[in-house]
Image (spheres, rainbow, N blue to C red):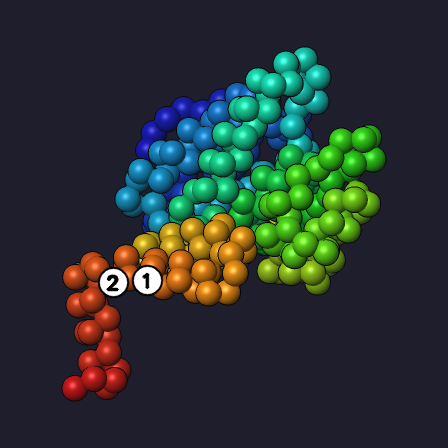
Amino acid sequence: MTPNFEFLNVTVQDGVATIILNRVEKMNSLCMKLRDEIEQCLDLLEADQNVRSAILTGGEDVFCAGFDINEVIETELESFSHRILEYHEKIYGFPKPIVAAVSGFALAGGFDLALCGDIIIASDTAVFGHPEIRFGVNPLLTPLWRKVGPSKAAELVMTGEMLNAEKAVLIGLAVKAVPPDRLLAEASEFARKLAKIEPRALAAVKRASMVVPKLDLRSSLEYEFGLTAEIMRNSELKSRIETYARKAGLIS
C-alpha cells in the first residue's frame, strides 16, 4: 500500500497498519479531505491481505478535536449529513480489528472516531467528551452506547461530561491508561496480538457486535451460530483445528 495522503501517515509492519492523523495545526479536526482519506485508507487496508489489524492515533499531543467547524457551518446540511453517514458506516464497518490509541483531546466527532476502535488505549493526558451538547447540538449516542451501555452513554451525551483517562478505564471505555510516550508501544502490542488471530473469526466477532445488540436472545444466538457455521465450512480451518486438538491430546 503506497498512496500519498495529505493528512494521514500510514505504515504497515508485521501485519499491523499504523494510521496517524496528520492535521496537527488544526488539532486533527475532521475536514472533508481528511474524512475522505480515512475512508480511502480503510478500503485499501481491507483489501490488503497482509494487513491483519490496525492502529489509529493522532500522536502524543491530540487525537482529534472533532469536525472542522468552519466546514460544518459553510456546507449545505443535507449533503453534509449524507456524506457523514457514509463516513461513519465505513469506520464502524471496517472488518479488521482497530486499536485506537488516544492522547489529548478526543472530542465530539473525534470521540466518535475513537469509538471505532475495538480496543481503546488512553494516554494519561486523554480527554473524551461531547461538548457540542452544550451548544445545542445533539451528539451521536449509538457509538458510545455500544461501548458503555445505554444508561452511561445517555448520561455522558446529555451532560457533555469530560472523561479523563482514569474515568475512561473505570467505565470500560478504555482498556488501560499509559504515559504518552508509551502509548504507541502499548497499542502496537495489542495490535500484534490481534494480528495473530484468525481473521475470519475476528471479522465475525465485529459483525456480531454490530447486530446482536438489536436482537432478542434466541435471534442473537442464531445469528452467531450462523457465523460459526459459515467459518467452519472452510476445510483448511477444520484441518488446523483437528491438528491442534491432536497435539493437545483432545482427540486420538
Q: Name the side, left or right, on which 233 lies relative to 87.
A: left
Q: In which quarter of the image is residue 82?
A: top right
Q: Which of 188 and 230 is in front in this view?
A: 230
The quadrant of the rendering that contains the N terminus is top left
Query: Residue 109 at x, y = what percent?
Result: 64, 35
Q: Is residue 193 at least partly visible in the picture?
A: no
Q: Name the side, left or right, on which 69 lies relative to 222.
A: right
The quadrant of the rendering that contains the C terminus is bottom left
Mark 1 and mark 2: Cα distance apart in space: 6 Å
The residue under label 2 is 232
Crowd band around label 2 with a 10 angstrom C-alpha radius: few (<14), some (14–19), many (20+)? few
The residue under the point 24% across, 75% down is 244
The residue under the point 74% across, 49% down is 154
User: Which of the numbered marks, if any, corresponds to residue 244?
Assistant: none
Q: Which of 3 and 162 is in front in this view?
A: 162
Decide: is 185 above or below 239: above
User: Which of the numbered marks, if any, corresponds to residue 228?
Assistant: 1
Q: Which amino acid does label 1 sit on?
A: Thr
Q: Quadrant of residue 238?
A: bottom left
Q: Name the side, left or right, on which 95 lies relative to 76.
A: left
Q: Is residue 240 at least partly visible in the picture?
A: yes
Query: Residue 17 at x, y = what percent?
Result: 41, 43
Q: Which of 215 and 23 is in front in this view?
A: 215
Query: Residue 66 at x, y = what percent?
Result: 66, 32
Labels 1 & 2 near each other (Cβ < 8 A): yes
The residue under the point 50% across, 65% down is 217
Q: What residue type is labelled 2?
A: Met
